[in-house]
Amino acid sequence: MSSVIDGKAVAAAVLEECRSEVAELKARGITPGLSVVLVGDDPASHVYVGSKVRTCGDLGIYSRKIVLPAETTQEELLAVVHELNADPAIHGILVQSPPPKHIDEEAIIRALDPRKDVDGFHPENVAKLVLEDKTGFVPCTPAGSMRLLAAAGIKTAGAEAVVIGRSMIVGKPMALLLMAKGSDATVTVAHSRSKDLPAICRRADIVVAAVGRPEMVKADWVKEGAVVIDVGINRIDDATKKSGYRLVGDVAYDEVAPKCTAITPVPGGVGPMTIAMLMKNTLQAARQLG
Amino acid sequence: MSSVIDGKAVAAAVLEECRSEVAELKARGITPGLSVVLVGDDPASHVYVGSKVRTCGDLGIYSRKIVLPAETTQEELLAVVHELNADPAIHGILVQSPPPKHIDEEAIIRALDPRKDVDGFHPENVAKLVLEDKTGFVPCTPAGSMRLLAAAGIKTAGAEAVVIGRSMIVGKPMALLLMAKGSDATVTVAHSRSKDLPAICRRADIVVAAVGRPEMVKADWVKEGAVVIDVGINRIDDATKKSGYRLVGDVAYDEVAPKCTAITPVPGGVGPMTIAMLMKNTLQAARQLG
């Protein structure tokens, strides 16, 4: 009964939009540019950065990948950021998280020119989200989740949305986006300290699960006909897989899906949207910086 | 049955705390200073500014009231702000709202040194609220509302809180404070576009009404035993009063109060807390600026 929200397809559509925006920008003499800075040799980070750079290439966005050794100091990394802030060829800057432990990530984020902060983590962009100022950059994961709702034709106005999780990167921005004028949802933010999470969740027309606990949201947490956005990406052991693991969301998909009007799978739901929204943000930066 | 949360008494207690903090600061050679800038001759604004200045005087906080004519230009006002930003005798700056229409209030707020923005409206402080960074300034009305909850011994952890209203000055910051770590409430933000506001409100252990509609919240909106914080201050016609009006909150007090464990009256509830929290913020600024 439930419709699966195909994140790959929606992401592909967003990337096609980006492709024509790139053409428009180039026609105006602007080649959008993104720089991704990677410190150390975390293999997962290298994979993420690789696909960001590839997507740029595919769309005609200039990209500059800067790989720094794990022992790079805070001052050296700050110097790189300052250089990129000043570089007119670069419209978006992203320092791949997590950096090595000796790096003060918050200070790095604060050092970014907020007009180039395409991750949307700089305080200036956090504030713009609260203040509903559209010139700010919205963090990619919640922005992608909103886009999935829109693509699936889900009306948020007047709907009861429950966001499980209150992180700075997903839960809070998602709640702010859902309650903003134009979205107009009635938003509840629930979390580990909430009493009777299942009962709270059952009220929701729209559930956004962003807690990072594998398959936490069960069938009896979800109202018949609800829409479920599963932001979680968790590895669990699976002896039947060559890798020894498989990816699951924060939602027990197999039992929850039959109750839903629409649901995002994991993988293939919110995941693919993240890079697509990063590209969108980079183009917004290029447009705004002129 | 219900206990009335006495805002005047709690505000007085906060001001006594402030008095000893002022003494401590002075012992360290710091005289905390607040400058209040008033543009134009709105009578209500003059009354507010007057009582802020008086409260400073009473506590031994240095205050500087700057009254500018209604025809002051944006540039002239910005020049005043810049001067106060640079003045080491001034730790807190407040530009009384609303300024005349030709003034871009947002630009004025952005021009404030965020370390002196004791109203908590600068984007830097908005972001700090989201990021749960305690060095930021929390807007006075929601900060005062939280203080009233604490003073009344109301536990917020795990409680269901419903905030009615999503303004930047009250609704959103109040929701963020209630959901922050340490407060740990399950927070719903409802608003004019919410469906069945009474039903949403009835779920609440804690109701915060911040919509600016006289006596909107009725008895059947409130669960037996709930706690109600009424942020509204509305004038309604009253022929029995000399002034021809009286002040009421967003809550129909007489019918709601009997159902509540605790409730704030209007006037005498949240209102008196605002100046008290402004003094608190000024002292925080003085401490942080050293």
Image (spheres, coloured by chain):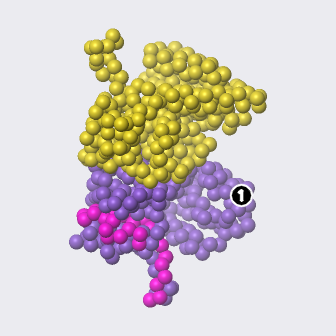
Chain colours: A yellow, B purple
Determine if the magenta segment contains residue B228. Answer: yes
In the image, A96 versus A79, the foreground residue is A96
Relative to A146, does residue B53 appear above or below in the rendering? below
Q: Please provide percent x and percent y for residue A202.
A: 30, 46
Q: Which residues are magenta?
A: B215-240
- Chain that bears disc 1: B
Q: Is residue B284 left or right of residue A131?
A: left
Q: Which residue is mark 1?
A: B74
**Residue A66 vertical placement versus B199 (above, below):** above
Is B51 covered by the magenta stretch?
no
Kind of residue at disc 1 = Gln
Residue at the image point whose x is 56% and y is 41% from the top: A125
Q: Is residue A76 above or below residue A283?
A: above
Q: Nearer the viewer, residue A104 or B107?
A: B107
Q: Nearer the viewer, residue A98 or A173?
A: A173
The extreme top residue here reads: A242
Which residue is located at x 42 percent, y 50 percent? A159
Q: Position of residue A144 (x, y in %)?
A: 50, 35
In the image, is B51 to the left or to the right of A213? right
Q: Quadrant of the N terminus of chain B?
A: bottom left
| Residue at the spot 64% in from the left edge and 64% down from the top edge | B99
In the rendered structure, the answer to whether residue B18 lies left or right of residue A254 reads: right
